Amino acid sequence: MSQRDLVAELRAARIEAPANVRAHVRLIAAADTTPPRRRVTWRRALVVALPVAAAVAATIAVTRPTHHNAVQHRGAIERATAPSATDQTFGAQKAVPAPSTTRVQRYGATIRLRVADPAAVSDGVTRAIRIARSLGGFENAVHTNLTGENGTADLTLRIPRANVQQAVARLTKLGTVTSEQVDITDLTAGLSQADRTIARLQRRLAALRAQHAPPAQIAALTQQIQRLQRGESATKRSAHYATVRMHLGTPPHVVDHHYVRNGIVLGACVLVLLLVGFLAARAVRRRREDALLSRS
Amino acid sequence: MTFAQAAEAHLDDVYGYLAWFTGDRAAADDLAGETFERALRLWHRFDPERGSVRTWLCQVARTVALDHFRAEKRRTRREQLAAQHERVDERFVEGLAPDLEAALHSLSAGEREVVALRIVLELDAGTAARVLGITPTNCTTRLNRALKKLEEALDVAA
């Protein structure tokens, strides 16, 4: 028998389901109450989500630094950027300009310091206030923010201008200086002009009194003089204290790229292992089926 | 298409496939019912974009039949039957020449299965391969092997 004849004969011998089987299947089909088909089922979603979740978890576990590692990192950063023995004298060698002793100046300094951790921030704030008070000054404003592994503090200190240079030198030793700025505004010329104006008005006031000028006119001029004198005093008072703005902060969180790369590699390995496991299980199952079906 | 419509349209195909696969009409009677019960439970997962209803039903039938073979194997072990168990002497295919029917019994279940899918149900190689869980090339190779075995058995009988 040729293969063509063989196929034709096999094809012709179709089997029909007997009546009892047909009736049974119709009964089964009559119980169809299935809901509309879902394209995305929870099972399909799990098949994708579980391996991805495993890979992400592995990545996070490796990239997230432990407290020990975080401390080591910060320590490494601090060591790398900490002032050396030479730099320890930064405050002294590179001192801010000294205020003038003969002229009236508005003196302001802004310094930013980096410290190791939130505890150092808190400690730095306490010591800065102590420094200000020891030099005759006071703290005008203090804002501290400590959260977990990070911390910042902003202080506004008012230091007698005569002691500001010493104050800045001591304050810069509380951490690693990252920036320093000084602003000096000379007020002497303005005050001299105010003195001349006051003197002129006083001469005029004396003349008005000698001429028995109307009392209203004398009172107005007197008030003007007093206003100028009050302004002059306020300017001199404000210039007596220098303003030092200080910022303390912990270093930003550094992501170790080695950890990120290792985490990604580990996540990829997890995915590959899952895939290999799936393929191996499928191959084993298929082999068992073939063995089962090899019998008659 | 509703499930009832699908069952009515493809019952003969599924039943024929099971009869060829198991080589046993009585088993095919039982397994046909099981197949459609399982298919009803899984009907919500059928995706028409991935294949026809007939192919999907054949896949379900195959799973049911494999479970049957595994259960038979366990039962055989439990009863400690060393020799081949007695098959019910019943023709599972009507209308075949006696020598051809005898030659069919020489095929394994796996070989009968591929003949049923490719020849009797006239599924193409790709569809039959999907039911079997193998590649189309592998499916064609199995079919050729089965047909050659049939030819040899027929030549011997002749």
Image (cartoon, rainbow, N blue to C red):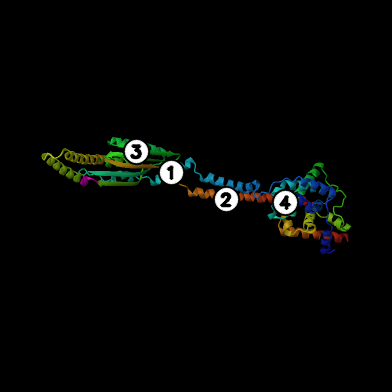
First in residue order: circle 3 vs circle 4: 3
Q: Are marks 4 and 2 on the same chain?
A: yes
Q: Residues within 10 Å of mark 2 (few under 14, many from 20)?
A: some
First in residue order: circle 2 vs circle 3: 3
Query: In the image, is residue A188 part of the stretch drawn in magenta?
Result: yes
Q: Is residue A120 visible?
A: no
Judge by depth and name the residue closer to the eye, A193 or A67: A193
Amino acid on which disc 1 is placed: Arg
Contact between labelled residues 2 and 4, with CB atoms less than 8 Å apart: no
> Gap between marks 2 and 3, in whole Å?
52 Å
Report the residue at 56% width, 47% height from top: A56
Amino acid on which disc 3 is placed: Ala
Q: Residues within 10 Å of mark 4 (few under 14, many from 20)?
A: few
Q: Is residue B84 left or right of residue A199?
A: right
Amino acid on which disc 4 is placed: Arg
Q: Which residue is mark 4?
A: A287
Q: Is residue A216 above or below residue B52?
A: above
Q: Are marks 1 and 4 on the same chain?
A: yes
Under circle 3, the secondary element is strand
Query: In the image, is residue A204 part of the stretch drawn in magenta?
Result: no
* Region in magenta: A186-190
Q: Are marks 2 and 1 on the same chain?
A: yes
Q: Residues within 10 Å of mark 1 (few under 14, many from 20)?
A: many
First in residue order: circle 2 vs circle 1: 1
Q: Which residue is mark 3?
A: A141
Q: Which residue is mark 1?
A: A74
